[in-house]
Amino acid sequence: MNDPEMVIDVQGLTKIFGDKTVVDHFDLKVPKGAVYGFLGPNGSGKTTTIRMVCGLLVPNAGSGTALGFDVVKDSSEIKKRVGYMTQKFSLWEDLTIRENLDFVARMYKVENRKKKVDDALEDLGLSARSHQLAGSLSGGWKQRLALAACMLHDPELLLLDEPTAGVDPKARREFWDTIHMLSDRGVTILVSTHYMDEAVQCDYIAYIAYGKKLIDAPSDELVDRVGIHTWRVEGKGLKALSNKLKGIDGVDDVARFGTALHVTGSDKESLKKAIEPYFDDPLLDWKERNPGLEEAFIHLMTGSEDNFQ
């Protein structure tokens, strides 16, 4: 039974290409107005799942609804009400910004087309560049244009597939400001990314690896649900120390973070026992710290099996 409060409510979505299961029994619930982060490494099945949710791919198994419509039977109705921004810029580079938006508005049969295009240009800060050819735009401006095109028909659900890949940090920050503005207006947003610093911008996070969902939770609860503990160590000889710690009972992960190592384990006492012999080394400075999302995802990935091997 699907939850009417959820804009996306799918169970067991599965997609198989040849002999490879690309998405394996995936469940997801996304409430109205939420910014839902969909994280995972490249090739993990994020794009395939998004395409099944919005009706572009038919699942081999599973069921559910998007915007109240069946993802299998009502794909055409879902497509009318969804804005989908692909990884690759897919508008026309030999048209101007305004011409691109006008053309998309025609395809969606948008009423009051000129006003809608003008409003989209204003909302995304594109008015001053409206006569510039799309092909001459930088990555950040192409991103804004693509988002403006997605919003012309006032979609209730916005699906953004790696929208900030290859975009500079300033443009990424501005893009997220726009995302939260749309969320405040009641638009539900599912955004896939592999940038950990973007995950904290989301209300909820689902993490997928090799076609399987490993965890989903409110973003401020996810690390606690993973249940890990972390020590940070700085100093000299970190490479040798890393090699010594890997594989020791109580140590699940050792990862380099800038000039430090983060040593993580699922049992607090076993972890401390494993690293205590190195506390007296005068060249090393140890500090217990709260684990972050990146440590949580590294820990989750440790037990994941590559479905393409």
Image: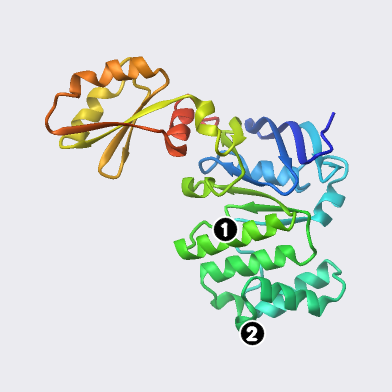
Q: Is residue 198 visible?
A: yes
Camera-nearest residue between 201 and 109: 201
Camera-nearest residue between 295 and 72: 295
Q: Please state which amino acid type lies under the numbered disc 2.
A: His
Disc 1 to disc 2, how far (Cα)?
25 Å
Residue 205 lies, with reference to residue 193, above or below; the image says above
**Quarter of the image where one finds residue 143:** bottom right
Residue 190 image point, x, y percent: 66, 48
Residue 303 image point, x, y percent: 48, 24
Say which element carries label 1. Answer: helix
Residue 276 lies, with reference to residue 189, above or below; the image says above
Q: Residue at x 71, y 46 (%)?
A: 51
**Quarter of the image where one finds residue 282:** top left
Q: Nearer the viewer, mark 1 or mark 2?
A: 1
Residue 62 image point, x, y percent: 77, 31
Q: Which mark is residue 131?
A: 2
Q: How is the image coloured?
A: rainbow
Residue 274 falls left or right of residue 183: left
Viewport quadrant of the N terminus: top right
Say which element carries label 2. Answer: loop
Q: Which residue is label 1 attached to?
A: 176
Camera-nearest residue between 194 and 58: 194
Q: Residue at x 69, y 59 (%)?
A: 182
